[in-house]
Amino acid sequence: MDVITWTPERVERLTQLFEEGLPTAEIGRRLGLAPRGGTPVAPPQRNFFEFNGPSCLWPHGHPDDADFHFCGARPLPGKPYCPEHAAIAYVRPKEPKEEKAKAALLPAANPGWSNITRGA
């Protein structure tokens, strides 16, 4: 590594180039400075939503885990999951029997009954 001696003349030239608005890389070239060793590059982040074509997006594991992945099987048309995982994801809640029975007795559910319940 070269040791740079900052003489008053070099400091004055540095100040002049800086005031001209030159980028630091250009100032370094004009002053004959060696380029830096480079800045450390962060490892690329995985994009969990990249996929090649349609595939099941059911997650396996936690996104922070090294072995985290999606199912990858062929999904149902219009759905993000394969048949196996869609059966888990799309479960309809069961209506309690009492609610079903009450709904059957309401006039809106049985329009023909409205005359009967009114005493017509």
Image: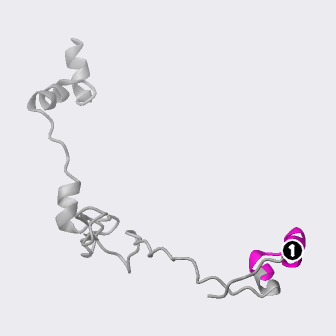
Position of the N terminus, as image quadrant, is bottom right
* Residue at image coords 81%, 84%: 31
Report the front residue among 20 and 92.
Answer: 20
Residue furthest out toward the left:
97
Q: What stretch is highlighted in magenta?
A: 9-27
Q: Give the color scheme: rainbow, by chain, secondary structure or one colour.
A: one colour
What amino acid type should be assigned to the residue bearing mark 1? Answer: Pro
**Residue 61 vertical position relative to residue 13 in the rendered view, above or below:** above
* Residue at image coords 24%, 13%: 118
Q: Is disc 1 placed on a helix, strand or loop?
A: helix
Whether residue 47 sits left or right of residue 89 in the image: it is right
Hey, which quadrant is residue 102 in on the image? Answer: top left
Q: Where residue 36 appears, x then y in whole percent?
A: 63, 82
Whether residue 35 sits left or right of residue 82 in the image: it is right
Hey, which quadrant is residue 7 in on the image? Answer: bottom right
| Residue density around tag 1, few if under 14, some if 14–19, many if 20 or more, within 10 Å | few
Whether residue 61 sits left or right of residue 79 in the image: it is left
Report the front residue among 32 and 63.
Answer: 32
* Residue at image coords 80%, 79%: 27
Q: Where residue 4 appears, x then y in whole percent?
A: 72, 82
Q: Where residue 24 appears, x then y in whole percent?
A: 76, 75
Residue 18: in magenta span: yes
Residue that label 1 marks = 8
**Residue 97 vertical position relative to residue 77 in the rendered view, above or below:** above
Q: Where residue 5 appears, x then y in whole percent?
A: 76, 80
Report the front residue among 79 and 113.
Answer: 79
Position of the C terminus, as image quadrant, is top left
Residue furthest out toward the top:
119
* Residue at image coords 57%, 77%: 39
**Residue 79 vertical position relative to residue 104 in the rendered view, above or below:** below
Report the front residue among 120 and 11.
Answer: 11
